[in-house]
Structure formats: C-alpha cells, structure tokens
Amino acid sequence: MHILLTGSTGFIGRTVQRALERAGHTVHGGVSPRHLASQPGEVAMDFAHDTSPAVWLPRLAGIDAVVNAVGVLRDTRARPIDALHQHTPVALFDACAQAGVRRIVQISALGIAGSGTRYAATKRAADTHLLGLTARGDVSGVVLRPSIVFGRGGASSALFMNLARLPVVVLPGAVLQASVQPVSVHDLADAVVALMGPAQDTTGLIECSGPEAVPMAGLIASLRQQSGHGPARVLRLPEPLSRLSARLGDQVPGVPWCSETLALLGSDNTADPAALRRLLGHEATPYRRLVESAWAPAAR
C-alpha cells in the first residue's frame, strides 16, 4: 500500500514508518516546513495552517491509506494545538472521504475521555469526527488510544528515565499514585501495521495498553531496577508546590513538565489489554521489560 504518514519525523511517527516499510508498504512521510521535504516519498505540509480539505486533496493522489501521528502536548504560536490536533486532522479526514481514501488510522491518547485539558479536548474532537465519518460509511477509520507510549526519543520516556536515575525521586502525590499501563512504541507501531494487513477490516475506537497496570511510583522503581540501580527514596511533593512547579514549566517552552502534564499524569491511564493483544497476535511488552525492548540502543 501507499500510505501517507503525517508526523513521520516525530517520536511515534519514525517508529511507525520503519515498521510499515519493513512490512512492505511505501510510506509517504508528511514533513513540516521546519523539515523541508528532501527525501524520496516526503510530502511537504503545514499542520499549523492546512485546515482546508482542498489543500489535502492533491496530496492524496495515489494514496491508499492515511496514518495521523501528529501530536503536541503544549500550545505554542508555531504549533497551535487547536490546528494540529483538531482542525487540520478534520480537514485531512474530510479530504480522504472526498478522494476515496478509505483506510485512516488516527493515533490519539488514552485518558482523554474524561479530561478537561485542552490537549484532551482537541484530540477528542478529531477522534469523534473520524468515528462519525466511519459510522456513515464514508471511510474505514480506526482511532488508537494508547496509554503512555514508551521508547527512546519520547519526551515523557526521557523524563521517566531521568527520574529513574535519581537516588531521590520527588513527585506530586497524584502522579505517584496514578495507575498506568505503558505501551512500547514498537508494539504501537506493530498495531498500525496490523491495521493495514490482517486487521484491515477493523474499525472504531481501540484502547491500547500494556499487559498490566502499575502505579507511577512502581513504574519508575521498575525502570530504575531495569537500568541496574538499587531502590531509590521516593518523596511526595506537596500539592501547592506541585501546582507551582507545573506553572513554572508552563513558562519554559519545550519542557515536558507543565500544567497539562500534571493533569494528565495525575489520572489513571489504564484499559483492557485484550484489544492490543488481539491486534498483535501476542501479549504486549510488560512494563518490566520496557528498557530492554523499547529503550535500549539494540531495540528495533
């Protein structure tokens, strides 16, 4: 298949592209103006401004399927979250319906259903639009909502690994207690491949999670153990200081710790692991093996 992959230069997109190409597909990577299209198969696009279906129609010529892996945690002038998460994906999905490109995979996020964050609201809007097009029979869409995606190159993964190296870990109580089911980025990429092959008739919303839940404090302890370190001392950051630290992070562009992160990580992020297991045809990577399988240089 010829697959248009938006967000191909990002953490998840890079891994998805490699997995699709290994499976024999031809990937046309969507590249932002900051990364000028210079390699064969690259398609120049601007998710911050390409909010009309008419802009996308020429790019869909010869395309069999679309995977949207664009995502940002924070709103900035260069990368406005409303456009990147909602308006541009909606335009792309509508263009697919007009062009007859039926297969669409939208990579979203678990935990956004009940969240009041701007990140969640914009993601939900695009998900809902794609599911509506699918319900009407205009496209064959799938929304993947993974739990925390773990792997080398991910900002949140780097944050967790840095915390795991510290002899003393200080985090907000809500974050320490929140349950997560992290997903290896390679498992998520393999799920996308399955949706282009054995599971190509699958549609709708699929929650993707690892095999078992663990409190965030337990995850960090496990990552520390996997990295060859002894137990660390874990301290609970008082709530006022938690909010203050997040607000300070809001003022520093590019830093993964901010008010949105505090709200998202302070809530449970779990789901039935059976859905991802069915897509993969085997159990997903357990959190106790994440460093070996998703972080180590030898990983795929």
Image (cartoon, grey):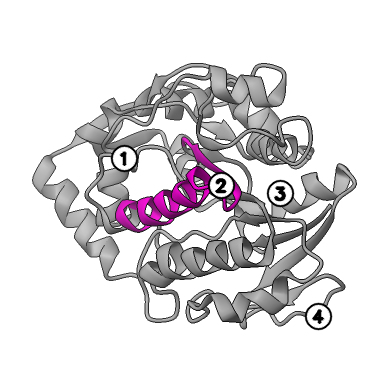
Which of the two discs, 3 and 1, labels the residue nearer the N terminus? 3
Residue extent of the magenta highlight? 120-147
Which of the two discs, 4 and 2, labels the residue nearer the N terminus? 4
Q: Residue at x 67, y 35 (%)?
A: 191
Q: Which mark is residue 38?
A: 4
Q: Label 3, on which residue?
A: 15
Q: Disc 4 versus disc 2: distance between alpha carbons?
A: 36 Å
When asked about the image quadrant of residue 57, the answer is bottom right
Q: Label 2, on which residue?
A: 137
Mark 4 residue type:
Ser
From the image, state whether disc 4 or disc 1 is nearer to you. 1
Query: Do callouts 2 and 3 mark residues in contact (Cβ within 8 Å)?
Result: no
Q: Label 1, on which residue?
A: 113
From the image, state whether disc 4 or disc 2 is nearer to you. 2
Query: Do callouts 3 and 1 mark residues in contact (Cβ within 8 Å)?
Result: no
Mark 3 residue type:
Thr
For residue 109, side relative to residue 189 (left or right): left
Which of the two discs, 4 and 1, labels the residue nearer the N terminus? 4
For residue 294, side relative to residue 112 (left or right): right
Say which element carries label 3.
helix
Say which element carries label 4.
loop
Give coordinates of residue 180: x percent, y percent: 40, 28
Mark 1 residue type:
Ala
Q: Residue 160 or 282: which is nearer the viewer?
A: 282
Q: Residues within 10 Å of mark 1 (few under 14, many from 20)?
A: few
